[in-house]
Amino acid sequence: MARLSFLFASLFVLPALAGCITQNITVDDENRAIPSIGGSGQDIGEGTTTTVRIRDFVYNPSALTVRQGGTVTWVNDDTVPHTVTGNGFDSGQIAPGGSFTFRFPSAGTFSYYCSIHPAMAGTVTVQDGLSPAGSPSGRQGPSGSEGLPIIVELKNQSFSLQALAINEGTTVVFDNDDTIAHAITGPGIVDSGAIYPGGSYPHTFMQEGTYVYRLALYPENAITITVQRNVS
Ligand SMILES: [Cu+2]
């Protein structure tokens, strides 16, 4: 059924891309939700360290929240080397039994992955020192506790954010600022249908978890949305 609706959307999207696409487009099971382990996150004060353990090709927890200035240590409990590779930090290969520590000096949402096994992904959300847990902490780390929708732009055949942490009940609006139509596939959305240039697609996230969404025609371009339980 998901594939049928994807094909249906493709009928609308493909004419806008005539001449640009020569590859076969497949949407596979990677679009399923990735269960979030410890998904509600942990608040860590400045000067403290939290540990992420890597085992069976999974970062555990895969999503966590630290205070600005907090330190995260990744420990490789697996039998093969892994990396922790993000924007501004890269562990290089962490041998089995080894570890990597990084201090996050500024607020934002930092996604990372393993450069050896790119399917492995995680997110560190760093809250500024002034914000209560779950409140907005800058453009890179928006959160929906105020009930405002979060805007994610689609442009240059990609998402304007690669990772986003929000509270349950938050609406994310995907705005197509690109010159071509896009469709988004993934759990809960499954298939947005064609979103034309200038158009938008809203989705409200009610369920705690970690979700990966992809552009149907550019499945290598993804956004990871971590939905945290409201803590008040
Ligand atoms: Cu790896």
Image (cartoon, helix red, strand yellow):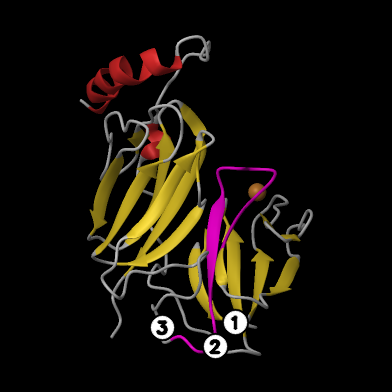
Q: Position of residue 115 (x, y in %)?
A: 69, 46
Q: Position of residue 199 (x, y in %)?
A: 31, 38
Residue closest to the eye, 17 or 166: 17
Q: CA distance from mark 3 to mark 1?
A: 12 Å
Residue shown at the point (46%, 29%) measured from the top left: 179
In the image, is 46 to the left or to the right of 155?
right
Residue shown at the point (23%, 24%) measured from the top left: 5
The span shown in magenta is: 110-131
- Residue type indicated by callout 2: Gly
Quadrant in which the C terminus appears: bottom left
The residue wearing badge 2 is: 129
Q: CA distance from mark 2 to mark 3?
A: 10 Å
- Residue type indicated by callout 3: Ala
Residue closest to the eye, 151 or 70: 151
Can residue 179 be found in the magenta stretch? no
Q: Residues within 10 Å of mark 3 (few under 14, many from 20)?
A: many
Residue shown at the point (20%, 25%) measured from the top left: 1
Residues at circles 1 and 2 in contact by the CB criterion of under 8 Å: yes
Residue 68, which numbered label? 1
In the image, is 109 to the left or to the right of 49?
left
Residue shown at the point (27%, 30%) measured from the top left: 193
Q: SS for tag 2?
A: loop
Please report whichever mark, 1 or 2, sits nearer to the chain's N-terminal start. Answer: 1
Is residue 35 visible in this depiction of the protein?
no
Above or below, 45 against 101 in this view is: below
The residue wearing badge 3 is: 133
Residue closest to the eye, 40 or 189: 189
Is residue 5 visible in this depiction of the protein?
yes
